[in-house]
Amino acid sequence: MAWKRFDILDHVKCEGINDFIEVISQAMERSADVGVLAIRIGKMGLINSRYGFVFGDYVIRGVGLRIRHWKL
């Protein structure tokens, strides 16, 4: 399944994994682009990989309009 593409502004702040998932979910609802998942939030330095994004101790994957996350 193709990744959705998101563009999230630098000023978005997330206080934890739940906020992060909420921000991505909202972005997914606004986006119809299909392609490489692209997320950049401030200076968090999210790591783009073919498996998802690393956020702290979590890996985030977008599948359709759902978010899957799990601890590394």
Image (cartoon, rainbow, N blue to C red):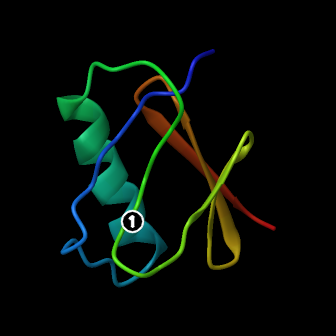
Q: Quadrant of the N terminus?
A: top right
Q: Quadrant of the C terminus?
A: bottom right
In this rendered view, identify the residue nearer to me: 21 or 34.
34
Q: Residue at x 36, y 68 (%)?
A: 41
Above/below status of 57 relative to 35 = below
Q: Position of residue 30 (x, y in %)?
A: 18, 32
Q: Position of residue 7 (x, y in %)?
A: 30, 46
Q: Position of residue 66 (x, y in %)?
A: 46, 34
| For residue 72, side relative to residue 33 (left or right) | right
Which type of secondary structure does the marked residue at label 1 adopt? helix
Please tell me in which quadrant of the rendered image residue 51 appears. Answer: top right
| For residue 15, side relative to residue 46 (left or right) | left
Q: Position of residue 20 (x, y in %)?
A: 39, 65
Q: Residue at x 43, y 80 (%)?
A: 16
Task: List the residue tagged with mark 1.
Answer: 20
Number of numbered tags placed on the structure image: 1
Above/below status of 50 relative to 57 = above
Q: In the image, what residue type sits under mark 1?
A: Phe
